Amino acid sequence: MAHVILGLLFLGNMSLYDLIKAMEQGTSLFYSASAGSIKRALDGLLKRGDVHVVSQETTGRKRKIYGITPQGRTSFHTWMMSPPENADLDAAALTRIYFLGLLDEPERVTVLESIRDAVSRSAATLAHTQTRVEGQSVPAELASVAHYSTATLDFGIRAHDTALTWLEELIVQARADLT
């Protein structure tokens, strides 16, 4: 969540309300967050020095406007350039792609290739699991359970195949932007 906030603040200074709205209108398709979790993450970023209060209204709603610090820009860039974690690969990959335009063109290719490689490794794990599962015998009373369990595995494999095709298209586009 912290990196999503940093990416949004990279685009411009925002209040907590602005951040909530930006997430609702942008990243919520692949990354959901409550107002409370956004506030907690923002407070953590403040403590770490990745963001700072740019201005604060002293009357009315006493709204604070937050901005990204140079340290925050470095943190965001380091995260963007790091490979996505397998634990939540979809959200990690899509969040990086959402903010990819903030990076220099050569870095975009590097990030996309890193994401593709992570998805490819995950797809290989699913394929290996499928091979193991196909060779197992299942008691008759569990046949329907096994059928639908393997259907979810099939879904994962197909989703990864689609993601890999899409990522290859993005990589081709990003490489074309270099010339």
Image (cartoon, helix red, strand yellow):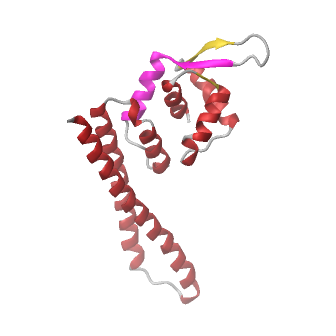
Viewed as shown, does residue 4 lie left or right of 80? right
Frontmost residue, 133 versus 20: 20
Frontmost residue, 157 versus 169: 169
Viewed as shown, does residue 33 lie left or right of 3? right
Residue 87 versus residue 43 in the image, above or below: below
Q: Which residues are magenta?
A: 64-81
Main SS of residues in magenta: helix
Q: What residue is drawn where x is 34% and y is 39%?
A: 111
Question: Could you tell me residue 81's position as x and y percent?
Answer: 36, 34
Frontmost residue, 132 versus 51: 51
Image quarter in which the C terminus is found:
top left
Asked whether residue 147 is in view, the answer is yes
Q: What residue is drawn where x is 40% and y is 68%?
A: 129
Magenta region includes residue 67: yes
Image quadrant in which you'd find residue 17: top right
Viewed as shown, does residue 103 lie left or right of 12? left
Q: Residue furthest top?
A: 58
Residue 6 versus residue 145 in the image, above or below: above
Question: Could you tell me residue 133's position as x and y percent?
Answer: 42, 75
Residue 11 versus residue 123 in the image, above or below: above
Q: What residue is drawn where x is 38% and y is 60%?
A: 162
Image quarter in which the N terminus is found:
top right
Q: Residue furthest left?
A: 179
Image quadrant in which you'd find residue 102: top left
Image quadrant in which you'd find residue 165: bottom left
